[in-house]
Image: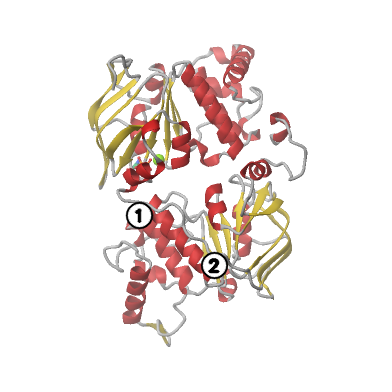
Amino acid sequence: MTEHQPTPAVRMIGIVKRFPGVVANDHVDFEALPGEVHSLLGENGAGKSTLMNILSGLYTPDEGEIYLFGRPVVLRSPRDAITHGIGMVHQHFMLVEMHTVAENMVLGLNKPRFILNLREIEREVEQLSAQYGLHVDPRARIWQLSVGEQQRVEILKMLYRGARILILDEPTAVLTPQEVDDLFATLRKMTTEGKTIIFISHKLEEVMAISDRITVLRGGKVVATVRKAETSPAELAKMMVGREVLFRVEKEEREPGEVVLEVSGLCANNDKGLPALKNVSFTIREGEILGVAGVAGNGQRELAEVLTGLRKATAGTVTVLECDVTNCSPRKIIGEKVGHVPEDRLGMGLVPNLPVSDNVIMKTYKERPISAGPFLNGGAIGRFARRLVEQFNIATPSVQTPVRLLSGGNLQKTLLAREISISPRLMIAMHPTRGLDVGATEAVRRLLLEQRKQGAALLLISEDLDELLELADRILVLYEGEVQGIVPAKDADVGAIGLMMAGVKPGAPAATETERRPA
Ligand SMILES: Nc1ncnc2c1ncn2[C@@H]1O[C@H](COP(=O)(O)OP(=O)(O)O)[C@@H](O)[C@H]1O
Ligand SMILES: [Mg+2]
């Protein structure tokens, strides 16, 4: 570091935070300067959110000290933190849905003036919006806004409250590529004014794009703090994971075979009884991966549920290998060799309190040698489970271990092991790598490609456009329950897909920001 380094905006020294059974932060030292974007990079569970929840006053550290602009502080609550100029935008927003944008600026501040001065607040919000390019209507109610807009409101709220240090926890997960670009422009604007941005992410490309410096956390400890200009994605990945990582999984050229899944004119409602899928049609062939892109909440979940028998279609048909399975039970659909990797691994996917062995036989327990007449064959179950554990490289103390004790990556491998063990002709996978670390992500992607190689048809629903571009043969974009377009993944134009994700049909003239946003 140079001699003329300014006083750090944030200095955290020797931070320790323990949760039952885990040291989430283990003597962490962290500092961020005024005017820098400092990323906190690490795999899931590395301790990033915990560290920043401490800085934003949500958690109290067990040990350690915090200095802001050179002065020691004790942060007892988020309100405490904001009076010190620290604002955090959480992964799950904390806005009040029924209130307007302007009202949300002051809710919880205990300032009676807000009723009186709402017009004044609206003007201030408009001014901040313009200053930072955070476009949002101050009079809109939160529930009327898209997720991207809600995030802008969260950021505005922190700015309104005088944040000089802004923490964003995995902010891009809910954004389209264009919204990510806009967010990054806003963050850069803030740093030119001397604000400090702490950007939490596990995505290397993003971190390389936005950061001045990067602190890598692994297993609750700091691995290193590096300058962006002096590092590379490969080095960062190695620090994150603790070993070399291969980035690209090899996808073989493959001619798709016969049609496995045919979806025609499919309609379905969401949990509120409103249309979630509108006249959706597509096919997937043997040895083909169809990726489904879209911002969360545009019908992806309902599509996966209808295809696996968990939700009723209100119109249209679903045909698997020429067998009409529209509105059939999940068991009947599994019988057609349809594998399912659900969004919610623990809960819908696996039974948390049952051992690995019972979890992996759930779809094969009626078959020999696992079942012998009315009884299950304990020895055969154990052998079957041990074979899968070995084959899929599942890190578990034994096959008797309840799955709830496994890490996210090993849960996902367990689930995939079970689904693949039925030799699926069609596999429906929803966010199969979400929240997984780099190593587990790589393993899961390889398994999916292996299924493609074996001739399975795969429907891959993902919010990670890079993942879709890497794995899929074609990409279908869902927007508000409608197919916006289906494009080949090879040589796909990310910008064009991003526009489709924002509701612009391909070929339509480029819309302005306001036109693009849903009413
Ligand atoms: N409120 C909590 N209660 C218990 N354990 C927690 C809590 N918050 C985080 N942890 C644990 O602390 C570790 C670090 O978690 P977290 O800070 O959320 O990681 P990251 O944000 O890097 O994914 C994990 O093992 C997680 O399970
Ligand atoms: Mg986190």
Of 11 and 247, nearer the camera is 247
Residue 452 got which mark?
2
Is residue 351 visible to us here? no
Is residue 16 visible to us here? yes
Q: Which color scheme does this rendered protein use?
A: secondary structure
Where residue 100 appears, x then y in whole percent? 62, 25
Say few, some or many: other residues with alpha carbon within 10 Å of mark 1 (under 14 / 14 to 19 / 20 or more).
some
Quarter assignment of residue 223: top left
Q: Is residue 488 above or below residue 5?
A: below
**Does label 2 or label 1 sit earlier along the sequence?**
1
Q: Residue at x 33, y 30 (%)?
A: 54
Where residue 88 appears, x then y in whole percent? 44, 28
Q: For numbered disc 1, what is the local secondary structure?
A: loop
Q: For numbered disc 2, what is the local secondary structure?
A: helix
Q: Residue at x 56, y 28 (%)?
A: 152
In the image, ligand 2 is in what quadrant? top left
Quarter assignment of residue 228: top left
Where residue 387 appears, x then y in whole percent? 34, 74
Residue 267 got which mark?
none
Question: Which corner quadrant holds the N terminus?
Answer: top left
Q: Amino acid at mark 1?
A: Ser
Is the CB atom of the residue marked by disc 2 within 8 angstroms of ligand 1's nearest atom? Answer: no
Q: Amino acid at mark 2?
A: Arg
Quarter assignment of residue 16: top left
Q: Is residue 428 above or below residue 269?
A: below
Read off the residue under disc 1: 407
Q: Residue at x 30, y 64 (%)?
A: 401
